[in-house]
Amino acid sequence: MERLPESSRQALLTLGVTRTYPADHALVHQGDAGNLVFVVIHGLVKVTARTENGRESLLAVRVRGDVIGDMAVLDGSTRSATALTCGATVTELIKGEVFLEFLRRHPSAALTLSTLISDRLRWANQRRLEFAGYSSDVCLARLLLAVAVRHGRLGPDGVDLGVPLTQIELGGLIGAKESTVQKILRALSARGLVRTGHRRVIVTDLPGLTAFANLAPIPPGNHPAKPY
């Protein structure tokens, strides 16, 4: 939403109806027909997909200002994933045909959506490259940093990821088993780089974790800057 011109943003928010959903509510289900688009006004939404062998993986997290369900509406296909709310979530619910007409009338919004889809593809490609080129501990460190920069919140002890991710879900994002993630988190904690809790990870040493992940220092403008 923040990428849209003000006029387009206001126009988009008048197209649908505002709905509030409880925690663990599926906005869309993998395999269903796609005829609705959701704009997240407040809250967090996890995007998951299940493979043919029944294993479920976390693909992404959507936050305030993100759009959910646009791909199926754009190409007329079925939903490629399930979107599940994390806590109470407020969305703007827009019919698919109304959303498409909005894009036709607002070329700048269509271009913004294209860049958003490009960003999602870059994120997915980066994760695939890391799977192939780095060990699991470096992959997890890079993932924690990526989530912290996108969604993190500064607190007295460090940077909370800002997203309640289980160790199984973290493993799904780097292609590792839960036991492997547990072992890596213990090692990172022993180094003083992170601190863990129930569905919670706090990066206690951002520069140290960045060095461990073999990444260049994070520019100051990209540091998580929003307090609790």
Image (cartoon, rainbow, N blue to C red):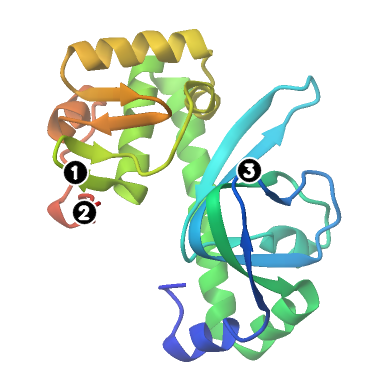
**Label at residue 24:** 3
Along the polypeptide, which appears first: circle 1 or circle 3?
3
Q: Is residue 144 left or right of residue 8?
A: left
* Viewer-side residue, 21 vs 186: 21
Q: Position of residue 92 (x, y in %)?
A: 61, 72
Give the residue type at disc 3.
Asp
Query: What is the crowding at mark 2: few (fewer than 14 residues within 10 Å), some, or many (at least 20)?
Result: few
Q: Position of residue 209 (x, y in %)?
A: 21, 27
Q: Please give the residue where the numbered disc 1 appears in the rendered image.
A: 155
Q: CA distance from mark 2 to mark 3?
A: 26 Å
* Viewer-side residue, 223 vs 189: 189
Query: What is the crowding at mark 1: few (fewer than 14 residues within 10 Å), some, or many (at least 20)?
Result: some
Q: CA distance from mark 1 to mark 2?
A: 6 Å
Query: What is the crowding at mark 3: few (fewer than 14 residues within 10 Å), some, or many (at least 20)?
Result: some
Compared with 36, 219 (above or below) is: above
Q: Secondary structure at mark 2?
A: loop
Instruction: State yes or no: discs 1 and 2 in contact (Cβ < 8 Å).
Output: yes
Q: Secondary structure at mark 1?
A: strand
Along the polypeptide, which appears first: circle 2 or circle 3?
3
Instruction: State yes or no: discs 2 and 3 in contact (Cβ < 8 Å).
Output: no
Give the residue type at disc 1.
Gly
Q: Residue, x 58% and y 38% (percent of image)?
A: 59
Q: Is residue 155 left or right of residue 68?
A: left
Q: Residue, x 70% and y 44% (percent of image)?
A: 82
**Label at residue 227:** 2
Q: Residue, x 33% and y 30% (percent of image)?
A: 201
The answer to whether residue 184 is visible is yes
